């Protein structure tokens, strides 16, 4: 049965971070655009892969700095809404956009369509400390963590901590000149922690978390979309095969794998907290105690969401648009065994993983199908634009990340 999307209601990709090579936004433009939905996007400039997509009706170049007041961002969104000329479904691709939409629902109401949630919930979920507290409140396992308020607290922690440990910024997006760490950072020694912490300022603004060793763990992901009553419209589970930087970064290669236990855990948690909309969860199954431990909760579309699709052709972005436009979301099981590859980062990740000798449990021997993040026969320009922007600066960036990981610090970029 074909999906009957409302072609009179456009979609708008909303992003405030500076990350022009974002395959998730391109995936969302293609997903709804192939159904005939007019698609618009906020882009850093006119020469991003998203702006090059044949399925994009119009790009709105808007390079934000991270220092704008929220009211200015809301005004900018409203100006874009007036240019579109009719209410559009908002699809945030970063935490700042998701939080802004939730916290300014009244101002955006009538101009856009978006899930209604407790205005403070997305910020709390995106915050590492807020998520840790919610997990404790609702009985969801998460790695033991410390929240130092000073360098002295870090010194005390380093005296008893079991290394390696993981450092993350407490807040998902940091409105200051330089965040404490650039994504998830693995720290292997006490000396390494103390050296890094000298530059973190007061208060440090980080969470220090137990590192779950890859030899005893499995990386799982959950992508889903929930209706206004926190009931799942589409629910997907999968395993992360490779990431870049290795073992701590953005998904480079993943498989869709059925995991009813994990799906039930995620659905119960969402019901308890009353969330509505799209989620992207990162969990690590700890074989030492048999628990799925929640590492990250992204209250928005994940970059690798196109890994997942039901037998009816529904992904989380399509489910959101159908639900917000009053259409029925077709039922269907997820297409298990599908593989997702992010071309520009999977090759270096593959080389790094082969050196480490690590293999991912549960990954099928053969995929049932492969979805490429960038290359699409019906929409080739985003791939070519990615290559043009990536080759020189991207290769240099990958090399810098690799050198960092060899020194004992591994970072995870947003997405």
Image: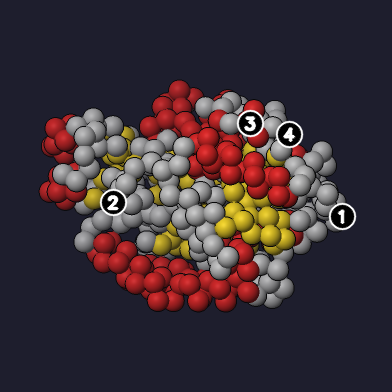
Depth check, mark 1 against mark 3: the one in front is 3
How far from the left and from the top, in percent, is residue 292?
46, 40
Circle 2/circle 4 CB separation < 8 Å: no
Circle 2/circle 3 CB separation < 8 Å: no
Pick whichever of labels 2 and 4 is earlier in the sequence: 4
Residue 327 in the image: above or below residue 118: below
Depth check, mark 4 against mark 1: the one in front is 4
Depth check: 350 or 286 in front? Answer: 350
Alpha carbon of mark 2 to alpha carbon of mark 4: how far?
44 Å
How far from the left and from the top, in percent, is residue 366?
59, 69
Q: Residue at x 68, y 72 (%)?
A: 379
> Within 10 Å of the Cα at label 3, are there few (<14), some (14-19), or many (20+) other Cα atoms?
some
Q: Residue at x 72, y 61 (%)?
A: 57
> Within 10 Å of the Cα at label 2, are there few (<14), some (14-19), or many (20+) other Cα atoms?
many
**Does residue 369 appear anywhere in the picture?**
no
- Provide the residue designation for mark 1: 1
How far from the left and from the top, in percent, is residue 177?
32, 47
- Provide the residue designation for mark 4: 110
- Provide the residue designation for mark 3: 107
Pick whichever of labels 4 and 1 is earlier in the sequence: 1
């Amino acid at each position: 049965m074909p999906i009957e999307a409302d072609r009179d209601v456009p979609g708008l990709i909303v992003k405030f971070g500076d990350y022009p090579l974002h395959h998730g936004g391109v995936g969302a433009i293609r997903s709804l655009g192939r159904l005939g939905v007019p698609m618009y996007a906020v882009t850093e400039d006119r020469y991003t892969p998203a702006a090059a997509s044949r399925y994009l009706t119009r790009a709105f170049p808007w390079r934000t700095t991270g220092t704008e007041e929220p009211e200015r961002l809301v005004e900018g969104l409203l100006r874009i809404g007036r240019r579109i000329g009719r209410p559009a479904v908002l699809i945030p691709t970063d935490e700042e956009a998701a939080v802004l939409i939730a916290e300014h629902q009244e101002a955006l109401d009538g101009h856009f369509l978006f899930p209604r949630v407790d205005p403070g919930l997305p910020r709390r979920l995106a915050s590492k400390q807020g998520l840790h507290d919610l997990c404790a409140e609702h009985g969801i396992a998460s790695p033991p963590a410390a929240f130092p308020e000073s360098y002295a607290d870090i010194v005390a922690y380093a005296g008893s901590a079991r290394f390696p440990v993981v450092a993350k910024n407490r807040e998902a997006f940091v409105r200051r000149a330089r965040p404490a760490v650039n994504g998830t950072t693995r720290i292997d020694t006490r000396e390494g922690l103390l050296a890094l912490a000298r530059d973190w300022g007061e208060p440090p603004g980080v969470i220090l978390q137990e590192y779950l060793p890859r030899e005893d763990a499995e990386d799982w992901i959950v992508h889903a979309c929930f209706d206004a009553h926190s009931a799942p419209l589409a629910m997907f589970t999968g395993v992360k095969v490779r990431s870049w930087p290795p073992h701590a970064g953005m998904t480079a290669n993943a498989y869709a794998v059925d995991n009813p236990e994990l799906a039930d855990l995620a659905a119960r948690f969402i019901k308890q907290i009353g969330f509505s909309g799209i989620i992207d969860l990162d969990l690590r199954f700890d074989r030492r105690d048999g628990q799925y431990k929640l590492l990250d909760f992204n209250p928005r579309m994940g970059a690798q969401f196109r890994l997942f699709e039901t037998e009816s052709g529904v992904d989380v972005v399509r489910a959101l648009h159908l639900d917000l436009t009053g259409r029925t979301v077709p039922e269907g099981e997820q297409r298990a065994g599908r593989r997702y590859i992010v071309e520009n980062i999977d090759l270096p990740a593959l080389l790094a993983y082969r050196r480490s000798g690590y293999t991912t449990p549960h990954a099928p021997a053969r995929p049932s199908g492969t979805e490429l993040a960038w290359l699409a026969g019906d929409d080739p320009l985003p791939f070519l634009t990615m290559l043009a922007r990536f080759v020189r600066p991207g290769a240099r960036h990958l090399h810098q990340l690799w050198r960092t990981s060899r020194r004992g610090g591994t970072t995870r970029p947003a997405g």
